[in-house]
Image: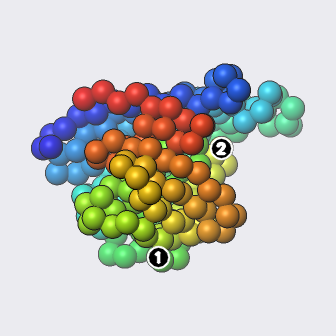
Amino acid sequence: MNNEKIQVTWIKKSNDKILGIEKVRMSIPDRIIVESLSVGFLNELESFSLEYHISCDKTFENQQFMLKCVHYNPSSTRPVEINSLYLTYENDDWMSNRNSELHKIANSARFVDISSTPLTNYFPINEMLRRGSKKETFNVIYIKVPTLETSILTQTYELIGPKKFRYINEDSKYKCIVYVDDRGLVTRYDNIWEGTIEN
């Protein structure tokens, strides 16, 4: 597993209509490094492109997230809006710099969840697989795309079959089924995302 390099393509569909696509490059040497570019549609008029970079150690004690999102909404007075976010986790503290505004985030969160990608499900699921856990509840920093605004959510993952998890957002009570590979990378997220993973 040392110096493992992975490429993932996720496609988001609804009623056979493609709503988004994401291409991820990931390496897992001493640190987990992720580079991603995605595009998606929010509705018939609004779309976005998102770039993000993640760097974290395998124990998730040191994490860095850099995101840039271009939001296109022709019906708005600002048809193109660009947001950026830089998150760091060190010494049990999260710091956020969104659009050059710096502030501290409640440090009860262990992981980050980006709303527009199934990639971030990997982190809590990988942790559970590593520990042999069947069910765990986590506080996460939830990043809303395209604004990149953050909030704290409570999420539960439960292993319900081989490489099959039930996901529950404890705040909204939203539930779905997530299928993963041996590492915990999502291969299918309910009937929303389908992933192709290449080594």
- Tell me the quadrant of the picture where the C terminus can be found: top left
Categorize mark 2 by other alpha carbons within 10 Å: few (<14), some (14-19), many (20+): many
Q: How many marks?
A: 2
Residue 118 % position (x, y): 49, 44
N-terminal-most mark, 1 or 2: 1
- Looking at the picture, does residue 139 appear above or below residue 177? below
Residue type at mark 1 is Asn
Residue 174: which quarter of the image? bottom right
Residue 35 visible in the picture: yes
- Tell me the quadrant of the picture where the N terminus can be found: top left
Residue 136: which quarter of the image? bottom left
- Residue pointed to by mark 1: 107
Residue 95 % position (x, y): 47, 67
Viewer-nearest residue: 5 or 157: 157
Q: CA distance from mark 1 to mark 2?
A: 23 Å
Residue 116 % position (x, y): 58, 43
111 on left or right of 56 = right
Query: Residue at horizontal 43%, vertical 49%?
Result: 164
Could you tell me which secondary element the residue under label 2 belongs to? loop
Categorize mark 1 by other alpha carbons within 10 Å: few (<14), some (14-19), many (20+): some
- Looking at the picture, does residue 110 appear above or below residue 77? below
Residue 83 % position (x, y): 62, 45
- Residue pointed to by mark 2: 146
Residue type at mark 2 is Pro
Q: Residue at the far front: name it.
A: 161
Viewer-nearest residue: 117 or 163: 163
